[in-house]
């Protein structure tokens, strides 16, 4: 199950890796005992912005749960554009899933990596179709 999830993530990353607005892609996949897994990646874009992402996963039956995740997108000067994560927050939020922007923190459901990449494409106004 974890390997299937990793294959889906790799397919998404490979789609974006060939886009003209992507300079570099690095993703590491680690399978752990008990149908758990960890992935960490870095995608660098032509404007110098970077997406750092991590997911810690647990497969149970036919589902794969994200126990921990973070998708941190920053500009070329390493300033936050947005960050999705489910880390404990102070002050406490009603839900652990939230999004940081430079001005606020809002509760939001966990996005997929594909959702995050689509948001980055919209922000960058890169209208090139991702294959």
Image: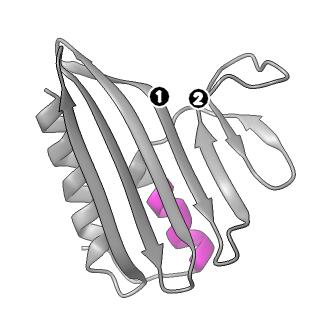
- Residue tagged 1: 68
Place of residue 70 in the rendered image (x, y in percent of width and height, measured from the top left): 52, 41
Rounded to the nearest angstrom, the CA distance separating label 1 from label 2 is 6 Å
The residue depicted at 84 percent of the width and 45 percent of the height is 104
- Residue tagged 2: 86
The residue depicted at 20 percent of the width and 47 percent of the height is 8
Magenta range: 116-124
Image side of residue 99 versus residue 61, left or right: right
| Magenta-drawn stretch contains 100 | no
Q: What is the number of callouts on the image?
A: 2
| Depth order, front residue of 21/58 | 58
Q: What's the magenta bit mostly, secondary-structure-wise?
A: helix
Q: Please report contact status of discs 1 and 2: CB closer than 8 Å, yes or no.
A: yes
Residue density around tag 2, few if under 14, some if 14–19, many if 20 or more, within 10 Å: many
Residue density around tag 1, few if under 14, some if 14–19, many if 20 or more, within 10 Å: some
Of pointers 1 and 2, the one earlier in the residue sequence: 1
């Amino acid at each position: 199950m974890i390997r299937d999830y990793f294959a889906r993530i790799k397919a998404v990353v490979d789609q974006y890796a060939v886009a003209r607005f992507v300079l570099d892609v690095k993703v590491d996949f680690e399978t752990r005992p008990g149908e758990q897994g960890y992935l960490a990646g870095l995608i660098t874009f032509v404007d110098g912005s970077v997406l750092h992402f991590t997911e810690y996963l647990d497969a149970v039956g036919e589902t794969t749960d994200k126990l921990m995740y973070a998708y941190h997108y920053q500009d070329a000067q390493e300033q936050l554009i947005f960050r999705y994560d489910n880390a404990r927050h102070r002050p406490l939020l009603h839900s652990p899933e939230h999004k940081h922007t430079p001005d606020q923190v809002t509760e939001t459901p966990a996005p997929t990596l594909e959702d995050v990449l689509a948001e980055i494409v919209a922000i960058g106004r890169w209208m090139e179709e991702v294959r």
